[in-house]
Image (tube, grey):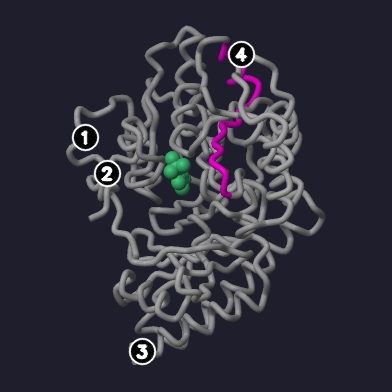
Amino acid sequence: MSAILKTYNRKKISFERGEGAFLYSKNKKKYLDFVQGIAVNCLGHANKSLINAINKQAKKVWHISNVFQIPEQERLARRLTKKTFADYVIFQNSGAEATEAAIKIARRYFYKKGQPKKNRILCIRNSFHGRTIATIFASNSKKMTEGFYPKADGFDHFDFGSHKELEKKITSKTAAIMVETIMGEGGIKVIPDFCLKGLRKLCNKKNILLILDEVQCGIGRSGKFFAFEYAKIKPDIVPIAKGIGGGFPIGACLVNKKVGNKMTPGTHGSTFGGNPLAMSVGNAVLDNLFKKNFLKNVKQNGEYFAKHLKSLKNKYPTVISEVRGLGLLLGIKLKVNNVKFIDKLLEKNLLTVKASENVVRLLPPLNVKKNEINKALEIIEKVCKTYK
Ligand SMILES: *Cc1c(COP(=O)(O)O)cnc(C)c1O
């Protein structure tokens, strides 16, 4: 009997080591890993530059309280702000904490402006922002909130794609609209550029902050550093996590000057957030991502992968109904059961993970090689054939 609380349906498999896009199980079988810790290991397993960075830092100092200056943290924040819309960064340890920080920062902004009642956050129904009390009620999905009442107040909801409901739900109390630029857990649903542009305009018009949760789709996953860059807009607040640590737990919230200036000493904090060990890895991740052509490769490989998945969809229309996503955040929506499909892929040594709406998520490392994508396509086609 396992002593782990049963909050996951775990596959009966464990791994001994990894290398790039591959994982090796205890019985020495080799698996192509297109889960990568759910879009976390952006540089694959056992990346040399990340190993060097963490080893080097581990010999110097691991943890320093945020009551002191942390130069490694200053550096990562500087680099993130230089590349993006943001002027400030606050470091956390997970995606849920990053989105919670985003909620606090939005509320604080209007509080300091003398509008304390403008404190409600408008979110997409059944989105995913984490598993804390506040973030589950931000999503408001039955599955995540059942048994966890009383409800954290202050969240309103609209359906993905429902412009009408969105406009209807905005009141004078709406402080922010918070959405995932690409819904990950929700089934790899991309908010189209014209909608993001419209959202930004709407927020400007109604004096509402725009929070784009890029915990899953950010840090190069979409083929741009942030997925919202495709729409050429600037949000006010952006929580990140997953990819930025390359496997080391890091969360962060990026904010613009207008909003960030309202956060003063004592308004937020974290014991672990932004410690030197984490920051050394974060900086090494950026060393790789900021290399010339890195993101271009993600985009090209993503397009290549999507194109071939679409031909599989055309070839096996009774199995695959849709190919979704951007960059290397891809999903195939199935007409057959996604969990069974995933088990069949696993049998053929390809690791994938499910998402809502009967989707199978494909999340290779961002530095995946074309022949590894081809191998995955081959396995997916073999599994498709079993349904004929
Ligand atoms: C994974 C995820 C989170 C939560 O991150 P944790 O590190 O699991 O707390 C929040 N938002 C989005 C979009 C995510 O994909």
Q: Secondary structure at mark 1?
A: loop
Q: Is residue 100 above or below residue 54?
A: above
Which comes sooner in the sequence, label 4 or label 1? 4
Q: Residues within 10 Å of mark 1 (few under 14, many from 20)?
A: few
Q: Residues within 10 Å of mark 2 (few under 14, many from 20)?
A: some
Position of residue 24 in the picture relative to residue 14 (left or right): right
The answer to whether the residues at label 1 and label 2 have Cβ atoms under 8 Å apart is yes
Q: Please provide percent x and percent y for residue 110.
A: 48, 15
User: Dividing the image into 4 quarters, which one contains the C terminus?
Assistant: bottom left
Give the residue type that dot 3 points to: Thr
Which comes sooner in the sequence, label 4 or label 3? 4
Q: Nearer the viewer, mark 4 or mark 3?
A: 4
Residue extending farthest to the bottom is 388
Give the residue type that dot 4 points to: Val
Residue extending farthest to the left is 147
Q: Secondary structure at mark 2?
A: helix
Task: Kindly indicate the quadrant of the structure image that contains residue 354.
Answer: bottom left
Q: Tell me the residue that label 1 is attached to.
A: 148
Q: Residue at x 72, y 26 (%)?
A: 74
Q: Which mark is residue 386?
A: 3
Q: Tell me the residue that label 2 is attached to.
A: 144
The answer to whether the residues at label 4 and label 1 have Cβ atoms under 8 Å apart is no
Which comes sooner in the sequence, label 2 or label 4? 4
Q: Residue at x 23, y 55 (%)?
A: 1
The answer to whether the residues at label 2 and label 3 have Cβ atoms under 8 Å apart is no
Q: Nearer the viewer, residue 301 or 157?
A: 301
Q: Please provide percent x and percent y for residue 104.
A: 46, 22
Residue segment shown in magenta: 247-264
